[in-house]
Image: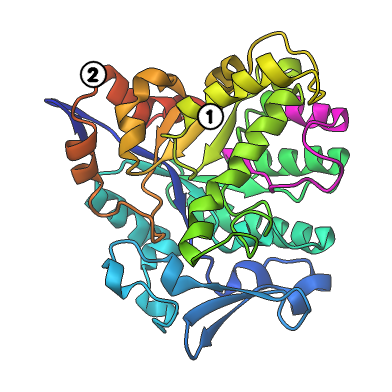
Amino acid sequence: MGTSGAVAVRVISADSHVMEPAGTYRDHIDTAYRDRAPVLVHDEHMGATMIIDPGSPQESRVPYPIIAGAGVAWDALSLQAGTAFEDLHRGGWDPEVRLADQDRDGVSAEVIYPSTGMLLCNHPDLDYKHACFQAYNRWIAGYCAAAPERLIGLGQTAMRSPAETIADLEAIRALGLRGVMLPGFPGEADFDDPRWDEVWDALVELRLPPSFHILTAGQSVGGAGFRGPKLNSFLGIIRGNQDIIGVLTYGGVFDRHPDLRVVCVEADAGWLPHYLYRMDHAYARHRNWLTVQSLSKMPSEYVLDQVYLTFQDDRVAFQTVHLMNAARLLWANDFPHSDSTWPRSQEVFATQAGHLAPDVFERIVHGNAAALYGLDV
């Protein structure tokens, strides 16, 4: 149980992950893509590694030991760790063990995102992405069915076209999944193009909150273009989500769809107050020469009302809740990834959130996520 002062509350992680096991894609994918399905291997240096599109020019690798680093000491996190899959967090793929992991962290439920599926968002072949995402949706539905009140699964769609995306959303809903993670770029135009308006309407009607996770917007952000040490690119991974917020705001999507709510995932939240100032300043002073369309409200008003932000141990976010909308903040433990607060999430609450009023704390760690995903836990 999370605590603020003397008040104990139930806790929901709004951003946790699975480590897709060997059969996730190969056992569920369209037979035409079985030879290209992501495959789990043991790399001599990196250990358990999922290979995306093996043998193709677009092949990429997901090193599980560095990703599944929850609870691992900082000096043990290494791309050369060489850990075998069976030695990683079993809860990352075994739902029964996952419940014990939740209990250890004082968490009542988790919203489940993929791991390999995040990097698949960057694959250039839309047809391949579509096949992989359909396979994942089938697998994650089975994983979460073991405890649907505590394992809250989200689907994926490649967004090849508006009509197909709506069909994907209907299939995701039929599988019992509670939301959908969208790729950083759609297959046609950009998210503010009016052709996607029917998709935003469908998301609202189907009650499937759309999410944008870091690292799903390609290599232009957090890639080789950053100067200096690797830490620079690591620090820059939130830019992809900030840009999407800008597209949806300045492109009029939020203006045209006032009931739409989107989730900005794992990009933290402490930066938001200054970013809102910059958004409003750019619109008020520079929208003429920047050719931004007229909006019926200031940019910050849309964001504060229509964008949820997840964060783990962002102490700045806890300190500046009064400068944001507490009803749109979602705490997360990011289990079993290396940024996870597991198994010390209760310590984070005690050291960073003790100053919050009990009702505000409850919203951030439970109430907001429960309302957004229709949970009774």
Residue placed most toward the observer, 179 or 28: 179
Residue bounds of the magenta highlight = 178-202
* Residue 275 image label: 1
Please check the rendered image and state whether residue 190 is part of the magenta-colored stretch, yes or no: yes
Q: Position of residue 77 (x, y in %)?
A: 35, 72
Left or right: 314 in relation to 288? left
Considering every residue shown, the one lying at the far left of the view is 6
Q: Position of residue 142 (x, y in %)?
A: 55, 56
Task: Give residue 250's quadrant in the image.
Answer: top right
Mark 1 burial class by Cα count in 10 Å: few <14, some 14-19, many 20+ = few
Instruction: Decide which of tag 1 and tag 2 comes sooner along the chain.
Output: 1
Task: Name the residue at 30% across, 74% down.
Answer: 76
Is the C terminus in the top left, top right, bottom left or bottom right quadrant?
A: top left
Please check the rendered image and state whether residue 96 is part of the magenta-colored stretch, yes or no: no
Considering every residue shown, the one lying at the far bottom of the view is 44
* Residue 377 image label: none
Tell me the kind of residue under disc 1: Tyr
In the image, residue 101 sits, relative to residue 376, either above or below, namely below
Q: Position of residue 185 (x, y in %)?
A: 74, 47
Left or right: 330 in relation to 119? left
Residue 27 in view of the camera: no
Task: Name the residue at 26% across, 46% down.
Answer: 345
Q: Are marks 1 and 2 in contact (CB under 8 Å)?
A: no
In the image, residue 224 sits, relative to residue 104, either above or below, namely below
Is label 1 in a helix, a strand or a loop? helix
Is the N terminus in the top left, top right, bottom left or bottom right quadrant?
A: top left
Tell me the kind of residue under disc 2: Ala
Task: Give residue 322's quadrant in the image.
Answer: top left
Residue 173 in view of the camera: yes
* Residue 357 image label: 2
Task: Name the residue at 50% across, 58% down.
Answer: 232
